[in-house]
Amino acid sequence: MNPHRTLALFVAATAAVCATGCVRRADPSPAVPAPSAKAAGAPVTLHVLALKAYVYREPHRQAPPSVSLPISTSVVVAADTTRSADGVSFRRIVGGPGDGGFVAQEDLGDAPPTAWQSLEQARTLLGEGKLDAAVAWGERSAALDASSREAWDLLAAIHDARGDVVQARAVYARRSRLPAQPAPVEEVASGSRAAAGEQRYIAATKLRVRASPSRTAKVVSELVLNTPVDVLGLEGDFAKVAWTSQSKDVWIVDLSADAARSAEEAAERRMGYVGADYLVSKPSTREELLARAAEAEPEGRFVEAARALERASLVTPNDGTLLGRLTRVAASAKLYPLAASAALKTVALASTPASSGRQTNGPVEMAMYFGCVRPPPLEPESACTAKFDSLGTCAPCGPASSEIDRTGNETPEELEEMQRSDEANQESHRESLAEHTKEKQQLAKETSALRRKFPSGPWVRARIQGSRELNAKGSRVFVYALSFGVTSACDSHTSRIGYDAIRFPVEARPWPDEGESLEVWATGGGYENVLYGVVAAAAKEEARDLIRGDRTPSGNTYYLGSPEDMVPKPFIAGPWHDCGCCGC
């Protein structure tokens, strides 16, 4: 049976079961045992464990089922089993609904399932990272007791983590009719209370910053683990802090030689109020966080242990063993969104080789702007002008002289005609050059006018969509600029590039997670004969290797046929021209 049923199936089952009264959560007995493969003696009574068990006329699934039995239905089956050609064991029903048909043994159990047992099984399977099976048992629990909000919470967490909007919306609709459960009690940081004038560090995974010292005040920002803050003062349980920050969703990148100073000036100094108990005197380390989890877990303080492991996973984001442990402890703590997210990251990390060589980025959309009315962030549709060919057309090639066609046997009249033809061609070329000069002058005026209207630029915008695989691996966003030259010869051209001159920003941002995005604005790399691109890598040297690929240099310079052959996608190139004349 496919364990991942749609919610419509178990909504119907809920009505069937609850017609005579739902089983409540008071039964803490262990998980339902499956029936033994061989039963001796007379027929036995078993009970449907699946959301729906299908009854077939023959012991196989090739034909449509004749009837379906809702969860918890009791049936009398023969003692022996029959195995189908595909290895599925069936039991023949000899009493009760579906009499005479065959039902898969995997859908039956010795005791009728309860909502509490099913929820316990779903929680265990979630902790093991078996999300499909966790969904199946969670749906069984909700079908047996639709008033159990915890079952719906578990299902919503898994569907949300997977990005399954349809299933999540159906769960939310059912859950909205139930009273909310109290949130798990969270621990606070230990240590001395902060004082005005001190520098402290955020000890929470994410800490809300409020506009005033009140729990109901507007949230103006969030600070992540180990963010340094300056304590300006204390007001009750709150500390007024200041910090230097750039937007999480928008990143302004300067690729010029003076990028360090420019990046520092672009950072914004902000202030707000945070819980004073979440400020510590030094950054949290992996070792300290793991020690805290090891102390809390045996004592049953699962929420505290899960939060410590979550923060340790932020310090070392590509540790699959740590993510697996976090999944288990978070499920025990009933922090289902955290458990589901950690489980998916564990799978993503396991499917990504530790050393991937040239890797594929997540979806990236790039655009180049000749200039903007002011520095970003802004809406480019109204504040920027699109990529503009500031180079114009190539100068016209001069005409070939008739001398190359002479044989030495021409008559005086033929030589005179050739000379007149050469003079006419030269005159035509002079006229073309004059026209080209006028076009260049006009282009210079247009370029100058655009620069006055859009004084900030050029800019490149990259819209980066989140990737669970890249985020779990610890990849970072490396934006870069690379200049190139083009030499033309007759009907071909050669691009010259030196990869040692790649320009990177001072720092790199983490690649956004699934469901997140990052908008990058880059400048300082130039406009004409320049490439801008984005790669995902763990470090700058890996990013450089990914850009260079397996190309072989001549000295320190690489020669390629076209600029588009120089770097991996995604990238965008500024204006460049292939101006080569043949036979001049």
Image: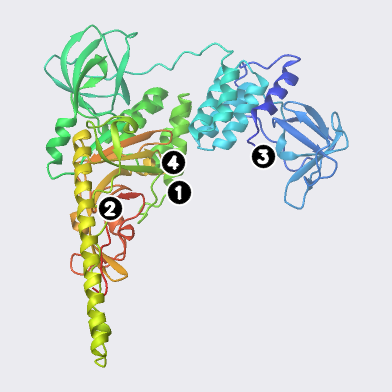
Distance from the alpha carbon under mark 1 to that under mark 3: 24 Å
Residue marked by disc 1: 351
Label placed on residue 2: 3
Q: Earlier in the sequence, mark 4 or mark 2?
A: 4
Q: Residue at x 22, y 31 (%)?
A: 374
Distance from the alpha carbon under mark 1 to that under mark 2: 20 Å
- The reply to whether discs 3 and 2 touch (Cβ–Cβ < 8 Å) is no
Amino acid type assigned to the residue bearing label 3 in the image: Asn
Q: Earlier in the sequence, mark 1 or mark 3?
A: 3
Q: Residue at x 25, y 47 (%)?
A: 480
Disc 2: CA contacts within 10 A as few (<14), some (14-19) or many (>=20)? some
What kind of element bears circle 1?
loop
What kind of element bears circle 3?
loop
Above-or-below relation of 211 to 118: above
Mark in front: 1 vs 2 = 2
Q: Is residue 448 left or right of residue 138?
A: left
**Percent position (x, y) of residue 195?**
14, 14
Q: Is residue 328 left or right of residue 550?
A: right
Which residue is more in the foreground, 196 or 422? Answer: 422
Q: Residue at x 74, y 39 (%)?
A: 105
Which residue is more in the foreground, 181 or 577? Answer: 577
- Report the quarter where the N terminus lies: top right
**Percent position (x, y) of residue 322?**
38, 38
Residue marked by disc 4: 346
Amino acid type assigned to the residue bearing label 4 in the image: Thr
What kind of element bears circle 4?
helix
**Percent position (x, y) of residue 250?**
30, 32
